[in-house]
Amino acid sequence: MLSIIVPVLNEHESLPQLLAEIVRSGERHGVEYEVIFVDDGSRDGSWQAIRQLSDQDERVSGIRLRRNFGKAAALTAGMRAAKGDLVLMMDADLQDDPAEIPNFLSKLNEGFDVVNGWKQRRLDPWHKVFPSRVFNWMISRLTGLKLHDHNCGLKLFRAEVAREITIYGELHRFIPVLAHAKGFRVTEIAVHHRERQFGRSKYGVRRFLRGFLDLLTVKFLTGFGQSPQHMLGAIGLTFLGVGFLGLGYLAVLWLLMNLPPLWGGAPLIAVSPIGPRPLLAYSVAATLLGGQSLSLGLLAELIVSNTVREQATFSISERAGRREV
Ligand code: UDP
Ligand code: MG
């Protein structure tokens, strides 16, 4: 069974047409499906529309969040309620075309766990399209998962993927990356994209700064999430090393100049005083930074060691043998 999850924020005009298109597409692909609308705190009557649709069609159900929690939270609520072994997510604004669903299903059957949409001819304003290109290029470079459109609203994945990745905040942009990091096979197909007919886009220009910060988070989580000290500690040791080198050099100079006179001899070298030297300031700063980074790393390790008890740090793809393992 296929569970279609649709996060909804103030999209009441689109919902009836969206459902009609999903039903039409469902007749074509012939798979049993359910539609879960998740109302993410709409204030425009979207919930009433969802209730109406779920009264008319028994395959349709709705979840209403108490306030606006964001798309990632809405998707998570939908995925927890989903009964299907396949999960398809799509936007509520009619920009994603339900007629694409059969193509997603057949691509998944070629042996993938995640099929990501790619809005090849994207019908959004340029101030969205251009930064999004840069963003996709950056994600692909940094995470090693090369996709044209990481944040496409239309995606199909197996229920295991939904169970094994955790999205919160605005991490819905990184579903393929998070799945890829768990070892799931991810691919993409080009999809037909449409202009927004009703309502307004929920994301402004600020999305790009936030998206960039989230990219750093995801890079850190997928790269060093299990061993943060490997990154923070390495940075810390580097800084400490540089700091100690500088301080050591200055200490030797000081000793050569000041020790012999203590025993009544002449200074071995004559150099300017150590106190005002820039090198001293830099070395002290590096030592402090190094110590900080190292202890931050230890703190992070403490948090990880306490959380891994509840979360699996691996992902199983298959089992063999008659014994339950
Ligand atoms: N959405 C949501 N909660 C939010 C923001 C957006 O559920 O806080 C939904 C919205 O209703 C739509 C989808 O996420 O179905 C994508 O939003 P939008 O179309 O505004 O994004 P864009 O296509 O402009 O990137
Ligand atoms: Mg949209």
Image: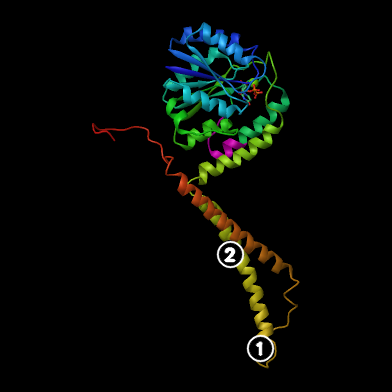
Identify residue for label 1: 260
Question: Residue 173 occupies which quadrant of the picture?
Answer: top right
Q: 243 left or right of 163? A: right
Q: Is residue 281 above or below residue 163?
A: below
Is residue 123 visible to us here? yes
Q: Residue at x 54, y 56 (%)?
A: 233
Q: Is residue 302 above or below residue 10?
A: below
Q: Amino acid at mark 2?
A: Gly
Identify residue for label 2: 241
Magenta stretch: dominant secondary structure: helix
Q: Residue at x 73, y 67 (%)?
A: 278
If you read the primary sequence from the N terminus, does the residue marked by circle 2 or circle 1 appear first?
Answer: 2
Q: 250 left or right of 155? A: right
Point out residue 204 in the picture as x, y percentages from the top left corner: 71, 28
- Which span of residues is magenta-colored? 138-147
Q: Is residue 21 above or below residue 40?
A: above
Q: 265 left or right of 39? A: right
User: Does the residue tagged 1 have its C-beta within 8 Å of any atom of ligand 1?
Assistant: no
Q: Residue at x 45, y 14 (%)?
A: 33
Circle 1 packing at 10 Å, graded few (<14), some (14-19), many (20+), is some
Question: Coloring scheme of the render?
Answer: rainbow
Q: Amino acid at mark 1?
A: Pro
